Every structure is written in structure tokens, then in C-alpha cells.
Image: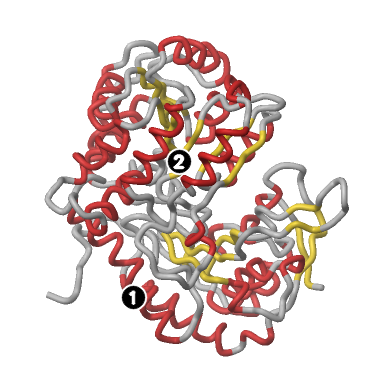
Amino acid sequence: MKTIIEPFKIKTVEPINFTTREQREVLLKQAGYNPFSLTSESVIIDLMTDSGTSAMSAAQWGGIMQGDESYAGASSFTRFEKVIKEITGMKHIIPTHQGRAAERILFGITGGAGKVIPNNTHFDTTRANVEVSGAKALDLPCPEGGDPALIADFKGNMDIKALEAFLEKEDKANIPLGMMTVTNNSGGGQPVSMENIRQASELFHKFGIPFFIDACRFAENAYFIKKREPGYESKTIKEIAQEMFSYADGCTMSAKKDALVNMGGFLAINDDALAQEARNILVVTEGFPTYGGLAGRDLEAIAIGLEEVLEEAYLKYRIRSMEYVGEKLTAMGIPLVLPTGGHAVFIDAKAFAPHIPPHQFPGWSLSCEMYLEGGIRSCEIGSVMFGRTNKETGEFEPSRMELVRMAVPRRVYTQSHMDYVVECLEEVWRNKEKLRGMKLVYEAPVLRHFTARLDYV
């Protein structure tokens, strides 16, 4: 059949509150023109993030009822640990309340002034936790990743030549570890090839540097490898994931993505000394090593979700859902990051609204208009999130790309919801010349996009 249907049935539903454009104009102004500050009741279709917004399965809800809430040595942790070890092969599994907590612990130990953490592309919280430690977050994306319209299989790859050049000139004492984000969220949700992961691992290890994976969307990345990389056609998603992790010395994960849960994460490490230091911090900041800021029921739900996410039928539907929206928008002429990624459709706001310069935040303007037009909440990944003013020169340094991410929650919306999104964007595209530049009214020193207030120029 041509139609790929959801590989699940719906048992529980949640009502959507519909608003008018006039109501949304008032609501957005009250929110300081920041979609993050809108209440969920004022949003019709929420595509701000796929993090923690998944619908859990009947098996997960059943697991929640069986969660062992013992403070220490809970059986739910044993199950959680077993599943993660089976997938990652990592020696030490340290639960955290979400991914950024794992990042905070890892970079709190390994970061510091003068240190540099290379990555294909850091996402916002990863970059923030690196920089808060005093270290520098270095992005080394492959050249293809900078061209939104270019069709290439693995635009999330790291630039291996640039990495080698950096490693050869930099003092190795200043590079505590290297990272690879799979899939590459800031780069448009683009996948990373197994070859690229292997090459990066070999290069880091050649220079005696540990290699870590940011594994938030590891299963989606594994599916792309299966479909696009020669030699992996007949392998299972689990086998591909296991090979991915075999090249790494550790990983961080927000379980709120590919573990199909609403809260949780973990830090996995092979090095005994680093793991012990991480657990010491965990006890102070998160909780006992066998729960790490999570309830036993959360550990159960994560363990089940990590097994469910490896089901190929689910991943086929998930990736096809993104392709469906991308195909509809591309047919209209709307510029996107192509090919579409695994968890989101990214609009190229720079090409969508070329009359708005980067320092007036075209992605933010487009995101606001999407909400005004159809009550759709999306996320700017551009110069509000990643741009900055150079302290020495005073010049504005824009983001590499100006994107609007429509991240689709897992197992939440149907095709008719996506058709509504397409229809809304068609109207915004028709009136794109009316989009106006924006300016910051308030910004926090770190992760400013979460709490910023803006207005039109």
C-alpha cells in the first residue's frame, strides 16, 4: 500500500482548545512574542519540540504501575540498566532526570577554562553546559550540511578533515573528549553515517581522546543508516545501534526523545574513574546512583520505550511522516532543509523571508506568524538561539543557518493534523512579504531563547 498508517491504535485522547487569530494576537503579545512563554492551552498544534512530548504505550503505562520505588537498589533500575547495556555495551549506566543533567555532570568534570569540546554540531543545552564550565564548544559540521537545499544522505556528518586539522594543532591536554550528535539536530535533524562515526572515533582515539555520542535520537539515526548506507540493508535497527555505540567511550542521552518518555535520561561511561566521579556528583545534585532524580516508574517506562523504539515498523512510520510533510511543502515551493530529517521538518527561514536580515531574526518572525495564522507552535533554530554579539568588535555574528524547526511529538498527531500544518504554512507562504523583522527586548545570559522577550522592529 502507498499509505503508511500509524503502527498503533489510540486508546486515550486529549482535547485541543481552538483559538481565533484575534485571540492569538493578544496571547502572543502578552508572551513577549516568545512561543516558549505561551500556555499549552493557547496552542492548537504544538511542534515546539519532540522532547518529552511523546505518547507512551499501553506497555509503558503498565510498567509504570510496576515501578519499584525503593530508594536504593530498585528492581526498576536493574531493568533500566540491563536494557541500556544491551543496546550501548557501556559499562556504567548513570540515570539522570534528563539529558542536560547528564551533560552538566559530564562537562562539569571534563570541562573548564581553556578546554575545547569538538562536535559535529552542539545543540543548545549541550553548548550551554560546555560553555558554563568555561570550555569552548567547537562545531565541525560537514560542508554539505550548510546548504539547506542540497540533497545528500548524511548531511549531519562531522567534517573529518577539519577535525584532523584541529587535533593536529591543538594541545591534546585541552581536549578532554570529542562528541558526535546523532541525529544532528542543529543541522536540520540530519543523520550521521556509520562510516563518519567510525572515522571520528578512530581519529579521536589516535590522539588519545575519549569519544562520546549525544544519543538522543540514536534509533532514528540507525534507521537512516539502514536505508541509506550500503552494507546495512539486512541488519536490524538494534544491531546498527550496537555498532554505533561500539565506537564510543560513553554517551549522554535525553530519554525524552528516542526512549519515548516524558522525563528522564542517562550518562553511560566505560571509564571506571570517570564513572565514579560522575556518581559522586550525581548523589549531590540528582539522587542515589540507582535512581538519579527519577522515580522507579520512570525507569520502567524508559526501559520499555528503548525496546519499542527499535521496532522497524514504528521507525518507518516516523520517518515517513516527516517525508510526507516535507513533500507537501516542497511542492508549494517552501524552502526546507532537505532531505527531511527523522524528528522534524526544518524551514529555511533565510530563504523564506530574504527581506529580513539575520540580526532581525527571520526564523523567529516566521515562527510567530505560524502561531498567529494557525495556532502552531514551532521553534526557531537561528540567530536568537545561536547568534551573538562579539564582545571585542561589537559586531553581530549570526547563526550558520536561520531555521524554524517543526518537531513532531512521537505517536501524538495524525496525518490530518499534519495536513492542517501544511495548509497553515501555505497561507503564511502566500503572504511572506508581510513578515516583519524583530528585536530583542530582554535576553538572559545563557539559553536566551527560552525566556527572551521580543517585539517587532
Tell me the residue at 26%/59% (across/down).
Answer: 228
Q: Is residue 111 left or right of residue 289?
A: right
Kindly identify the amino acid type of the residue bearing the numbered disc 1.
Ser
Along the line of sight, the residue nearer the viewer: 12 or 44: 44
Q: Is residue 196 left or right of residue 114?
A: left
Image: 366 above or below 222: below
Tell me the residue at 40%/27% (across/down).
Answer: 250
Q: Quarter of the image for the C terminus: give it.
A: bottom right
Image: 166 above or below 156: above
Q: Residues within 10 Å of mark 2 (few under 14, many from 20)?
A: many
In which quadrant of the rendered view does residue 105 lie?
top right
Q: Which residue is mark 2?
A: 180
Percent coordinates x, y for residue 443 in the rendering: 78, 51
Q: Is residue 25 left or right of residue 262?
A: right
Percent coordinates x, y for residue 46 in the rendering: 48, 62
In this figure, which colouring scheme has been used for the structure? secondary structure
Image: 408 above or below 61: below
The secondary element bearing badge 1 is classed as helix
Percent coordinates x, y for residue 355 in the rendering: 71, 81
Q: Which residue is mark 1?
A: 416
Tell me the residue at 63%/68% (across/down).
Answer: 363
Kindly identify the amino acid type of the residue bearing the numbered disc 2.
Met
Say if residue 254 shows up in the picture.
Answer: no
In which quadrant of the rendered view does residue 113 lie?
top right
